[in-house]
Image (spheres, grey):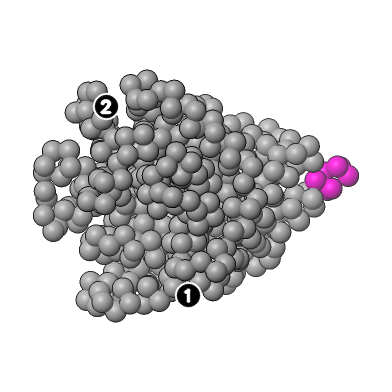
Amino acid sequence: MKETTIDRPFDPLVFWVSASVTVLFVLWSVFFPENMTSVINAVFSWTTTQWGWLYLLTVFLLVGGCFVLMGNKYGGMKLGLPDDKPEFSNFSWFAMLFGSAIAAGIVFWGPAEPAYHFMSPPPYFGGEALTPQTGANAMTYSFFHWGLSAWSIYAMLTIALAHACFTQGLPLKFSSAFYYVIGDKIHGTWGKVLDIFAVFATLGGLATTTGFVALQLSAGLKYQYGLALGDGSTYMIIGVLTAIFTVSVYTGIEKGVKLIGDVNMWVFVAVWFFVLVFGPTIFLINLTTNSIGQYLLHFIPMSLFTGPGYEGNWIGSWTVFYWAWWMSWAPFVAVFIARISKGRTIRETVAASLILPSLGNFLWYGVVGGAGIHYDVTKTLNEHGVESAIFAIAQNLPMTGILAVALIFLIGTFFLTSANSAAISLAMFVSGHENPGRNLRAFWGIALGAVAAVLAGGGSLKAIQTASIATAFPLMFLLLLALYGTFKGLNKYKKEHEDK
């Protein structure tokens, strides 16, 4: 009897091509690091200068599409069959969703980005550095980079994927998101190409975050405790993190990811509350409120601001980098959110993956990032790098030692939540199974660590950022296809069931 895809633990073509190219990339990075750096820098320059405008337009359209999905026409439609019920409680569902999608990036950039814009004003607002108005503008741009635009990328792809999988009985793979565009071709060569590409995009996106985490943990140990781990510190930290999340992902989603997600969310809220209460409370509340107002007022012009006539490549280094980073994460985040959202409506899923996370980011940035502006940690950024910002803020608050431990724990657990979900999603990409085998999950956990190590081992922030942009470029076009396919498929499904 011929073996089917469902009978096999993984799709041989998708797995072996993905695994082979991943190994070749690691070898290329190890034996020819200068050549690798040169190539990815060239890719960074080309994509950000020539295609930045399309990144902006794509994300702007995705935001609009998400709000349409929450309306009366589509909002009540279920991601699944009529009798399907949600698997997780609302708290655990949102904790896993938020943790997998945001990771330690929010702990890295939350205090660093507002402070950076405070001392180097974005061209959209301009003005003098280190003034009250510049501080408000810095926070507004941080809200923009971590608000609705970022989360719309995840939300739209999640709906495309979840609805197709749970109503059409499709495997939980990235390629299934394009069922409403190319139909049954997702089961053939085109589907395999899409899934192979999703593996590479995920590896690039997670490597970016792993690099940030390793740099931040290394900086925290040195800045807070004077513990300099030497040149191999990045490799050491990535090795420890890889070992932990590989063991966790081996235990399965219910035990590993859910537990980490729940604990992580409670610590996240506790740290935020601590900074709000023991920091400059009224200043932080005023800054957050003011910046939300500016964000809403300037959302459309910021979304389409390409910086024409300005010297340098600020938009490429910041906005386009962020949009590309979110895009490189989109395949695995969408698969993971879809996996845990079966039985929920489109409206509640979009709200939980667009509105609520944006508000959560605003509160975190407004308080933790606002504390960085109030205490002016810009000197620390110049001397020790952006990765040290969160620990510089901790120095100005009571119980610094306890807070520093909580921050290190938060960085690690946020990352572990994302790494877990990424490894599970990678295993889904190459198997098509909702619950892929342990060995397959563990393999991709190790692969994630290896790619991150070769990209972040040199401690170069530019190389890490470029990895995201390089892998995300084709995804920009695929997201536009998914946007079209989502509404095409929902309209068809709605018409068929209304007729019945």
Residue 405: x %, y % from top left: 22, 32
Between 394 and 414, the one nearer to me in the picture: 394
- Quarter of the picture holding the C terminus: top right
Q: Residue at x 21, y 42 (%)?
A: 220
Residue at the spot 26% in from the left edge and 52% down from the top edge: 382
Nearer to me, 248 or 480: 480
On the image, the x and y values in percent for residue 186 come to: 62, 64
Which residue occupies the foreground of this view, 289 or 364? 289
Instruction: Rate crowding at label 1 as few (under 14), some (14 to 19) or many (20 or more) other CA atoms within 10 Å.
Output: some
Q: What is the three-letter code of the residue carrying label 2? A: Leu
Q: Is residue 85 magenta?
A: no
SS majority, magenta: helix
Numbered circles on residues, count: 2
Name which residue type carries label 1.
Trp
**Disc 1 element:** helix
Q: In the figure, is residue 20 to the left or right of 312?
A: left
Write down the region rendered in magenta: 494-500
**Mark carried by residue 397:** 2
Secondary structure found at label 2? loop
**Residue 232, image quadrant:** bottom left
Label 1 sits on residue? 46
Q: Position of residue 332 (x, y in %)?
A: 48, 52
For the point 41% across and 57% down, the residue is 205
Q: Is residue 131 visible?
A: yes
Residues under numbered marks 2 and 1 in contact, where contact means CB atoms less than 8 Å apart? no
